[in-house]
Amino acid sequence: MKRFTYIILLLTLNPIHFVMAQDAYKLSVEELFDRGVQNSIAIQASYVKTQISDDKLSLAKNKQLPDLAIAGVFGYVGTPTILDKDLTFLGHPASPDWRQNYQVIAVQPIYQGGRITNSIEKAKLEQEVAQLSLQKNKADLKLWLMAKYLDLFNLYKKREVYGKNVEEAKVRVHDIEKMKEEGMITTNDVLRSKLLLTDFELAYNETNDNISLVSQQLTIVLGMDENLILMPDESLLTSQLDIRNENDYVSLAYSRYPDIQITRTNMALAKNNLKLTKADLLPSLSLQASNTLARPIPNTSPVQDFYLNGWGVTLNLSYHISAWFDRKRNVSSAKREIQLQELAEEQQMQTIRADVKSAVVKHKEALDRIKAFNESVKQANENYRIVKNRYFNQLAILTDLLDANSVQLDAELQLTAAKTNAIYTYYQLQNVSGSL
């Protein structure tokens, strides 16, 4: 009978939301993360950046291959004019009207002072940074999704608690009205009870609206139908979230946290940049092979209108003397960049130790709050039962009863908040240790 009364109550309070509940969708944590990663625009942008880094690596590797070039010239040659020393006209020599020149050139780098090798290494490191940034963005997204997911937990629990309180308040109003009819209490008690019932009904409806709003926020990010009302998996609240000791998490973070890995990769990039800077001070050596087909033959007089085909192999050696003028500043700047990255890594390690310490302490605090509020709920329920019996036996005033009801409501809401906070601090700990 009580269950039937509660269903009727839901229909009476907010029939629209009850209809919307028919479109409820139970969402697990695994699906939450999977859909979030698949549909997030920020994650898609990070994927594009990794693809760009892959392309840059392929281009850097192509520098090891021969550089092939094909050139061609075809054009009309005007008739030359011969002039005397005093620029008087002497005549027009016979010459061909058309000129053609076709070349095929292949240049194979032999020694570039480490430029090509270090450019490939630089592209690999940039690729690693892009992948680490993707990993970091995924972890940040998961933590945000979990925060919204836990908001739903709190809202559903609030709705449940307010629903029970509305039901209890209606029964209480009915009993108080009977006592008023019997002349046992004043009208003031009836009015105050009805006001409290109205407050509970408003809170219930507002919580329903908030469930719809948070569900919409999540469905937009997850790429789902925005009219769905999401329901979290309640088993998450009862799952065992065991944690390691603080030093284990610090060690994990040192080796896996994306930010410190990015810092270390940036330091490797700075060292690579120093090698590239020094490579500018070294000579370049390449092997060139070419074949040229030209018409007319240019090295004869008069010019002969025939094709001349020639080929050759040359060894090219070049050295940029001007690089020495900027050597000192370039090398110094590259070394200082390495020093900056070393300081950044040290600072990142300090931040990790502080973040891990904070996450461990906050999680333990959340677990302690769960134990404390479990006891508080038991005590609040017992206190309300006692005060309620005393009130209807005219041994307590209405204020005592309403205060006991308020304490009971707060205790239940605080217990749920403590449970969801413990889950959130657990995922925070996984995030700062690079395990999310």
Image: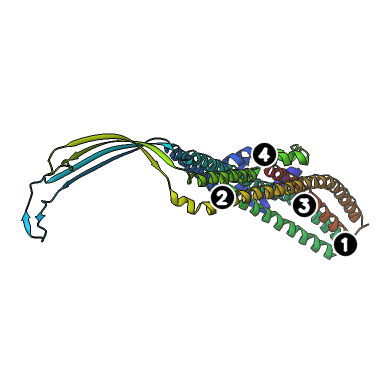
Mark 1: which amino acid? Ile
Tell me the CA gap for discs 3 and 1.
Answer: 22 Å
Mark 4: which amino acid? Ser
Q: Are marks 4 and 1 in contact (CB under 8 Å)?
A: no
Looking at the rendered structure, which numbered label has been put on residue 255? 4
Q: Earlier in the sequence, mark 1 or mark 2?
A: 1
Q: Secondary structure at mark 2?
A: helix
Q: Are marks 3 and 2 in contact (CB under 8 Å)?
A: no
Quadrant the N terminus occupies: top right
Looking at the rendered structure, which numbered label has been put on residue 165? 3
Q: Nearer the viewer, residue 367 or 58?
A: 58
Q: Nearer the viewer, mark 3 or mark 1?
A: 3
Q: Earlier in the sequence, mark 3 or mark 1?
A: 3
| Residue pointed to by mark 1 | 185
Mark 3: which amino acid? Asn
| Residue pointed to by mark 2 | 334
* Residue name at image x 43 percent, y 40 percent: 59
Q: Nearer the viewer, mark 3 or mark 2?
A: 2
